[in-house]
Amino acid sequence: MSDGLFDVPGHPGPESDVPGGAGVDFRGPGSAAPLAVRMRPASLDEVVGQQHLLGPGSPLRRLIEGSGAASVLLYGPPGTGKTTLASLISQATGRRFEALSALSAGVKEVRAVIDLARRRLTAGESTVLFIDEVHRFSKTQQDALLAAVENRIVLLVGATTENPSFSVVSPLLSRSLVLQLHSLTDADIRSVLRRAITDPRGFGDSYTVTEPALDHLVRIAGGDARRALTALEASAESSLDGTVDVTLVEASVDKAAVRYDRAGDQHYDVVSAFIKSIRGSDVDAALHYLARMLGAGEDPRFVARRLVISASEDIGMADPTALQTAVAAAQVVQLIGMPEAQLTLTHATIHLATAPKSGAVPAALGAAMADIAAGRAGSVPAHLRDGHYSGAAALGNAQGYKYPHDDPDGVLTQQYPPDELVGADYYAPTDHGHEREIGPRVQKLRRIVRGR
């Protein structure tokens, strides 16, 4: 049975010579270290998950097997193995392992590690520099790494929960492989837990964990092996008779993991999925992502703004009341706040997700903007120009304008666009919802206005 991939900040791996580095190896039988630390994979054979990165000949496998030399940026959710992979790379290559956390290290600490690595290199010894939360480094701190990475004084392994494309400076990005790690599957998490229960590094069969308890641990892990092991350890510590059942797990663990980071890349991924679920009319998926955002403490004003945008972008005139509901929800958020406004956001989400959809509004704007970008602007027809100033009539402005309200039908034949755009159709109503009714009216109005 194989183990999982997971990170344990503060304990990246074996020995370090630099203050603030990795420290000692906390793995091993009888260790008082947390269960997640003791169960970190000691070899590639113990790794579970990330098979898309570990196939034969893949860059990551070559690094771990000691035949690769490129620096890497490991990007993915917590508990997926970023620290573990960095440690395995160090072990496989025989390099010294140094670890820094962007939360506590500055330019001084970075330069100290690079100076140490340079001295080692003269003695024929290479260094792996692992930087956790590398996205939190400032531009100056990241720039301090460039020469060392380019000249291979260090093999950089950076770990980040945010998309490096947005958080890592371009020169460093271009000198590194960017590898995205995925959340572990339920099967992966279950394998990690079973290994921890039986392996001597873990509990060595000293506890009995019931299947319902195991199912619950998998469910609350949210793809994070460290969270699963921490929950298992907390539950085991509360056991009086060596048995861990679902009741004990529920009492020991407050709530399930929420795969969402308001300040990170998942912030954009989840809200993107939220809007796309509304656009796709999947009301249940939309409610899932709404609950995920609200459960993680997302700013309700941000959610409300996205709903207002979606009402015009994805629904428009197919249901003109959708915008009214979304705007009202945004106002309620301002008026009463949370937690009561959650109901209003849910109300608006259900309305928008179940409403008929039309992309005619953004399509109409896009078509009009395309003409503007192409230079098709033209002069405003003279009869439509402002006539409220002295001398306007002498210039021909506002002369011959026909007032629509003077016509019994309220609409009459008259040129409104510039000469170059006469006959241009931008708005194309669909046959969805209310647009099914206004489509024929739009055609009728065009015929009258254009005198056809």
Image (cartoon, rainbow, N blue to C red):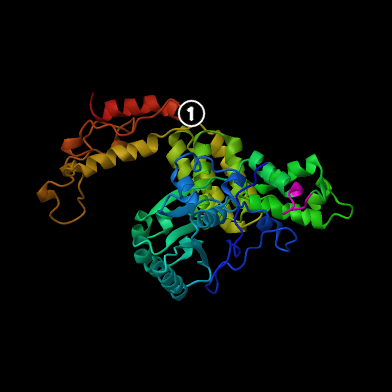
Mark 1: few, some, or many residues within 10 Å (few <14, many ≥20)?
some
Q: Main secondary structure of the magenta part?
A: loop
| Near-viewer residue (247 or 267) | 247
Q: Taking 339 as reference, is 60 left or right?
A: left
Please identify the quarter of the rendering in which residue 15 is found. Answer: bottom right
x, y percent for residue 32: 73, 64
x, y percent for residue 429: 38, 29
Q: Which residue corresponds to the image point at 21% horizontal and 50% vertical from the top-left?
A: 386
Q: Which residue corresponds to the image point at 52% horizontal and 56% vertical from the top-left?
A: 86
* Magenta-tinted stretch: 197-204
For residue 200, say whether it is visible. Answer: yes
Q: Is residue 368 above or below residue 293?
A: above
Q: Quadrant of the C terminus?
A: top left
- Kindly identify the amino acid type of the residue bearing the numbered disc 1: Gly
Q: Is residue 287 above or below residue 446?
A: below
Please identify the quarter of the rendering in which residue 349 is found. Answer: top right
Q: Is residue 198 magenta?
A: yes
Residue that carries the numbered disc 1 in the rendered image = 433
